[in-house]
Image: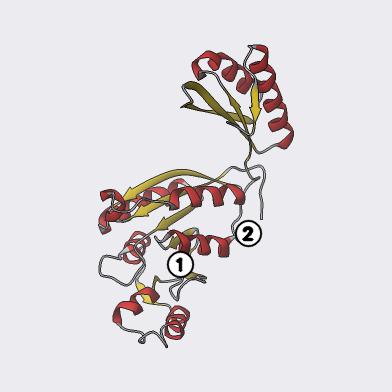
Amino acid sequence: MTSPDKIWTAGLVVIGDEILSGRTHDKNIAQVASWLQVQGIRLAEVRVVPDVESRIVAAVNDLRSAYDYLFTTGGIGPTHDDITVDAVAAALGVPVVIHPDARALLERYYATRGGLNEGRLRMARVPEGSDLIPNRMSGAPGIRRGNIFLMAGVPHITAGMLDALTGQLEGGAPLLSETIGCWVAESEVADLLRQTEAAFANCQIGSYPFFREGRVGANFVVRSTCADDLAGCTARLVEGLEGLGYPATPGGI
């Protein structure tokens, strides 16, 4: 479902002491952001918070009121410090309940894996009124309550949950992009970038400098929800760069 005239936005809360300590390198921010772009939704803000209920509650309440959607990753496993469900329920002012379908899924999954013990049953707990997000990788589902989506911290499990949600969210026109590479210091073409962006109100130009092979260069990423504006802005940028004596490389360097 799309609503092209509106810019849909989402917030993301990344939960876990292991992220903040550096023991685990987060991969979910990039994959959630990329998936949202395809759905026509912009990831507008990310917060990384520890396994502390009050901090999770504060982040959830701030971001769910600021954006159309809120995603969380991490903290929905079987251990005592997996407190995301409790925190989100507290933020919403609803109790935590055992979802019968989640319990049935877990019972089937663990039937040949030692059975459903108290820790594993924790993964059937949801804020009251929630629906489930399918998880093909393991028995524990993700959780959806309205426009809030609770997902695993393990990136490949999160990817599967996102795949299950594809096409299920209302969003705007997907963001399109083109990349142009050039061996030039971005400071040398700052005026060109500013003028080109100003000439195309529906486009944004990002500049990403690099140093390679003893040379300074930059990749310029043009973004727009309109294919015609994107093509026009990209062509104007290429023309401007080459007019200044800097050959452009389609696709980036």
Rendering coords of residue 239 (x, y %): 70, 18
Real-space Cα separation, disc 1 to disc 2, in angstroms: 17 Å
Q: What is the residue that sits farthest to the right in this orientation?
A: 228
Query: How many C-alpha atoms fall within 10 Å of the one at disc 1: few (<14), some, or many (≥20)?
Result: many
Residue 60 in view (yes/no)? no
Q: Nearer the viewer, residue 3 or 32?
A: 32
Eyeballing the image, is 76 above or below 98? above
In the orientation shown, which residue stands out farthest toward the top? 244
How far across and down, in percent of the image, does residue 35 sit? 55, 52
User: Which mark is first along the chain, 2 or 1?
Assistant: 1
Residue 141 as seen in the image, left or right of residue 97: right
* 12 left or right of 117 in image: right
Query: Quadrant of residue 205 in the image?
Result: top right
Q: Does residue 33 appear to the left or right of 226 in the view shown?
A: left
Q: Are marks 1 and 2 in contact (CB under 8 Å)?
A: no
Given the image, on which type of amino acid does mark 1 rest?
Ile
Name the residue beneath numbered marker 1: 143
Give the labeled residue for mark 2. 167
**What percent of the width, then of the height, locates residue 13?**
39, 52
In the displayed structure, would residue 142 be above or below residue 39?
below
> Split into 4 quadrants, where in the image is the C terminus?
top right
Tell which residue pokes out farthest to the front in this image.
213
Query: For the N terminus, which image quadrant?
Result: bottom right
Q: What residue lies at 43% left-to-right and 51% top-to-bottom?
A: 27
Question: Callout 2: few (<14), some (14-19), or many (20+) C-alpha neighbours within 10 Å?
Answer: some
For the residue pair 164 and 55, the one nearer the viewer reads as 164
- Asked which quadrant contains residue 126, the reply is bottom left
Q: Is residue 208 visible?
A: yes
